[in-house]
Image: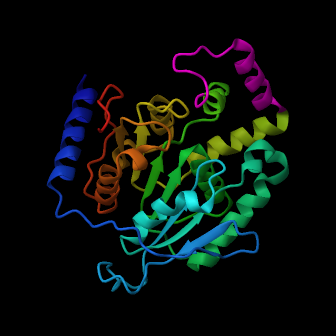
Amino acid sequence: MQSTLVNQLRTCAARRTLATSAKPLAYPSPAFHDAPVDAHGLVRTARPSSEDPTLPLSRSPRPTVLVLGWWNAAPHHLHKYVALHLQRGANVVYATLPAHCVLVPLVSLDTNIRRLRDGLARATDNRPLTAVHTLSNNGAYAYAFANALRPISTAHSVCDSGPSFMTPENLVAGTLGAVLPPGSATPAWVTDAARRYLGFGPHARIIERLHAALADLPPCPTLLLGGHRDRIVPPASIVELASKCFREDRTAAVWFDSGHVEHFRRFPREYRRVVDAFLRDELPMGIPPLSHQGMK
């Protein structure tokens, strides 16, 4: 009871912070071009325009943010998230772990994680990051594996629509959640097939590596952004992982009344305010109850 009350108070405080923040930042769509930093085109960079007088260009070295996309996201899908951080005056490095890393992990996972980590090192000269912004489980898993390969130093992390543990139930939800009608029951044989797939020796070892990597992410302040309408990675699965892998006193969460990776599209102004307040260390820590009404 006491824990629930504390979370409710923190949530109210977070709402007051957002409502009383200083004049909101202007977020026009900046003009930028993306430049691959590796021969495979996996990692790209974007820099703020030096001609935009609204950007804080005096900081040196300029802060850098890493954005990691959802499964099968193309570079142009990530541009609005890149723009969000460009408009805060940061350089942005962004990438998406290729789809075949999920479909055929035994063949391509380690190779592409190494490409991602090497590309990040080249793009940043191994300097610490201001933030890592992950999208869906794919982005969070890429972050975890890359950090396990060589530690990533970051001051903040923002996790949109994830992460959750890789379990048969979550795998089925992620695969079928977007196509089955709401309330549909998943056939038992589908979950059983997923259990056998994940239980296959090499796959099981990759899952063990993944869960260990998620538990070993940098202990920086972390913002979780979930959606009550998300059937692929619902808030309950995010909270389950956070309770075991993240420090409660360094974790904040905001629930939106939206679906999977839809928060920014449906609530652009609120999304920007939440992320901006968090990166300015003005968002109180705490995870609101799952019964808390999503931001509308």
Query: Which residue sits furthest left?
Result: 20
Look at the image and say whether residue 193 sits in the magenta stretch.
yes
Tell me residue 291's x, y (percent): 32, 25
Towards the viewer: 163 or 175:
175
Tell me residue 24's x, y (percent): 22, 62
Tell me residue 70's x, y (percent): 59, 49
Residue 120 located left or right of residue 258: right
Instruction: Say above or below: 211 vs 145.
Output: above
Point 48% across, 33% down: residue: 230
Towards the viewer: 292 or 146:
292
Count up the numbered dots: 0
Point 30% across, 53% down: residue: 269
Look at the image and say whether residue 205 sits in the magenta stretch.
no
- Quarter in which the N terminus is drawn: top left
Tell me residue 221's x, y (percent): 39, 54
Residue 253 located left or right of residue 216: left
Point 42% across, 39% down: residue: 226
Residue 5 located left or right of residue 37: left
Point 62% across, 53% down: residue: 73
Instruction: Say above or below: 257 vs 91.
Output: above
The region drawn magenta spans 177-200
Instruction: Say above or below: 160 vs 244.
Output: below
Q: How is the image coloured?
A: rainbow
- Quarter in which the C terminus is drawn: top left
Residue 54 located left or right of residue 264: left
